[in-house]
Image (spheres, rainbow, N blue to C red):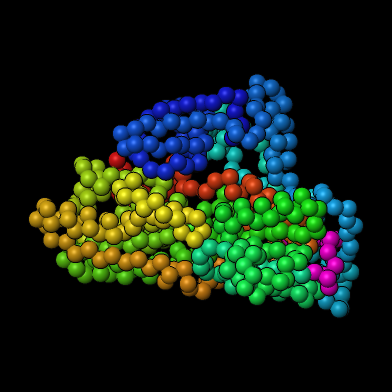
Amino acid sequence: MALASSVEFAGPIGSGQNHLACFGMPSSRRLRCVGYEKKSRIGQLVVRAVSVDRPQLDFSNPDWKKQFQEDFDMRFSLPHLRDVIDLEPRPTTFSLKSRTPLQNVNGTMQESWNGYVNDDDRALLKVIRFASPTSAGADCIDPDCSWVEQWVHRAGPRKQIYFEPQYVKAGIVTCGGLCPGLNDVIRQIVLTLEKYGVKNIVGIQHGFRGFFEDHLSEVPARRLDMLFVLGGNGTHAGANAIHEECRKRKLQVSIVCVPKTIDNDILLMDKTFGFDTAVEAAQRAINSAYIEAHSAFHGIGLVKLMGRSSGFITMHATLSSGQVDICLIPEVPFSLNGQHGVLQHLEHLIETKGFALICVAEGAGQEHLQKLNATDASGNMVLSDIGVHLQQKIKSHFKEIGVHSDVKYIDPTYMVRAVRANASDAILCTVLGQNAVHGAFAGFSGITTGVCNTHNVYLPIPEVIKSTRFIDPNSRMWHRCLTSTGQPDFQ
């Protein structure tokens, strides 16, 4: 969002992490906030709608939309090898046309195959025209919520390519944790490379370490023409650094990413592969916890799911289950004690229902825990265990008030991470893997491929790693979740 000047709003909120997100501004028809900083429990929410990477816009200027679109087009243009190297394209070697002419639906013979994407094809990044900044989930550019078209590049095979397939050496590297569908994406990258005619394909072991540790087998194969990188925000940042270095050296190397994060927290994407499978697998843990809680006297089921900074798995698992009474996510602070705390609501549930079921994201409620000041192998902060903390707090609380409770805690991390992709994810993996190869042969580099508003697109890496994608607590989806659980505002 680009503004002529900053807009501030102050109000009380809970403690937590800094976030980049968009929430409506209370009692105002002005712009929505685009970021928020959560300070102390008895603190203030300070919101500044400011532009840090775009030119300031004067909304009184009748040409402000043109200025915005020019800036958008510049930021979302795709880096190409021709930007730094003088290259001539050649006809593609990718074709699904059979040896015999294809038949049209009217019975005539088809002489050409219309299976290629034009470089000028575009898809709309945003398709909802909000009437007001107060509309649920509204994402506005100006105070009047004007409609401005934002077009991004369509993914798919092109008629012309910028590599000789028989001379191409392609590498595939994955970083981060396990994710359903990972092997499906790798398989489709390999199959599509072979369809183009590439014979030399290598896998890089142990993530980016595989490029500089001499004892690893593929290190001697350092000359690569294409590198396919599968990972999350940090991995994308690393891939972009490699891309920039290749551009600086004017190398004919194409770097293409496929977003891999089970948390579904990549900006601008409808969803990332593995997410649907994770939500589906989480149902088994929720069902087990529900059965345990329902069959016990004053039973309380507690399920912890993945989600370091974003609660998409927890929210969607809650919505699909229909059995969860309390859903806790990192984006929405909560109180444990007090009149409006989680423990008080649990008392109410035990009194009225006789049992309760809680679903919590691993990154939720970190303000209640002691920081470990440690990082994992990927450089992420090691989180304290909110699941164990909640289990202990619940047991202690009910013991103090003299009410028996039986808390069943389930942490199904690798039961969710290590399962095979379901049908929906397997199809998505197929499309992503194929489009990654198409993008590389089309000469693009420093890009990632994904789905925006149901369309397959290419996006420049810097635009998807500006921040983590978060759940908007003012969104309709979160409101649907609250309606499903019936939980109050734990503040």
Q: Position of residue 269 (x, y in %)?
A: 59, 53
- Residue at 88 percent of width and 56 percent of height: 87
Q: Which residue occupies the extreme bottom position in the image? A: 99
Q: Position of residue 271 (x, y in %)?
A: 55, 57
- Residue at 86 percent of width and 78 percent of height: 99
- Residue at 49 percent of width and 61 percent of height: 377
Q: Nearer the viewer, residue 103 or 448?
A: 448
The residue segment tinted magenta is 155-168
Q: Position of residue 307 (x, y in %)?
A: 44, 56
What is the chief secondary structure element of the magenta stretch?
loop
Q: Is residue 391 above or below residue 187?
A: above
Is 239 displayed left or right of 6 in the figure?
Answer: right
Q: Position of residue 325 (x, y in %)?
A: 30, 56
- Residue at 35 percent of width and 40 percent of height: 15
Verify whether residue 226 appears in magenta.
Answer: no
Q: Is residue 126 above or below residue 355?
A: above
Q: Say which quarter of the image contains residue 301.
A: bottom left
* Residue 224 makes an appearance in the image: yes
Quadrant of the frame with the C terminus: top left
Q: Nearer the viewer, residue 124 or 57?
A: 57
Q: Nearer the viewer, residue 205 or 55?
A: 205
Q: Nearer the viewer, residue 357 or 91?
A: 91
Verify whether residue 157 appears in magenta.
Answer: yes
